[in-house]
Amino acid sequence: MPVRKRTGAFGYRDILLALRRIGLEGDSQIVVIGPALVPESLRGGISALTAALLASCKTVLAPAFTYQTMVYPAEGPADNAVDYPAASAASVEADFFRPSLRASPLLGPLPEAIRRTEGAARSDHPILSFAGIGAAELLAAQTVADPFAPIDALAKAGGDVVILGADPPANIALHLAEQRAGRMRFVRWGLTPQGVVECPAFPGCSRGFSAIDPKLAGVEQAGKIGSFPIARIPLRDLINIAAGWIRSDPQALLCANPECPFCSAVRRSIQP
């Protein structure tokens, strides 16, 4: 008896065609965001999505952040968006960073799938690492003091950000735009087998990043695979638009939560 095909189901070939329709070719270089969850309608699951991305692009980069490595001192820099006593007490639960450490589930399943792909490499930032295929030079650009250098290098190479899913994790490329616009950074600490590493230039809140969407109408290439949205945005355009907006409106892209410690600290830093 033939198997009934699920209505709205899609798989590897459908993804491949959709990626080509938004402009991805064999020599494309991308950083990819999302999806938050694997759709039930995706035949082959996250493996099919990963394979289609690798078939469409020369370089695939993804954030492989490990928030589970963060530790905190009992005291630290002021206005650093952290309750030191509470965070320090919770630091006993931290894990050591190592190349095999799972990417944070908050990033969705794709970064971990990319990290586990044969031939993938990973940078060694103790909190904000990236994983990628065909991305050795980009990964080598990252330092503890410049965690978003791989995105910067990809933008200079003419790369794109690709966003997948209806509710993907935040577009982390916008943290580079904040950095270029001079927005304040924070300090965090990562646990490694060699000891605790101080990580400056740590980004703030990303919950307000969706506010950029209307400003990207002229540069975004959007499409769908069934009801599954996808989009490609040239990184140079994204970063220039966002950084320019922040310079003209220092509160741009901040979240609306008045109790957010990150956005509250940024607002205090821009008060005259």
Image (spheres, grey):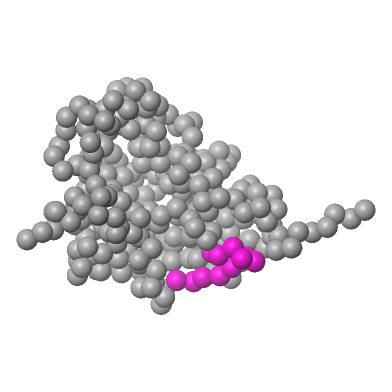
Residue 177: image quadrant is bottom left
Question: Looking at the image, which residue is at 36% across and 41% down?
Answer: 128
Residue at image x 31%, y 45%? 147
Tell which residue pokes out farthest to the bottom in this image. Answer: 218
Question: Residue 162, how many percent across, how many down?
Answer: 48, 60
| Left or right relative to 38: residue 215 | left
Residue 173, magenta (yes or no):
no
| Residue 120 drawn above or below residue 20 | above
Dominant secondary structure of the residues highlighted in magenta in the image: strand
Could one spot residue 197 in this view of the protein? no
- Left or right of residue 47, residue 1 in this image: right
* Location of residue 68 with respect to 171 vertically, above or below: above
Image quarter of the C terminus: bottom left
Residue 139 seen anywhere in this rendered image of the structure: yes
Magenta segment: 220-230
Q: Disc count in the image? A: 0
Q: Position of residue 178 (x, y in %)?
A: 26, 57
Quarter occupied by residue 238: bottom left
Q: Position of residue 120 (x, y in %)?
A: 52, 41
What residue sits 59% from the left and 68% below the top? 224
As drawn, the residue found furthest toward the left would be: 272
Q: Nearer the viewer, residue 205 or 134?
A: 205
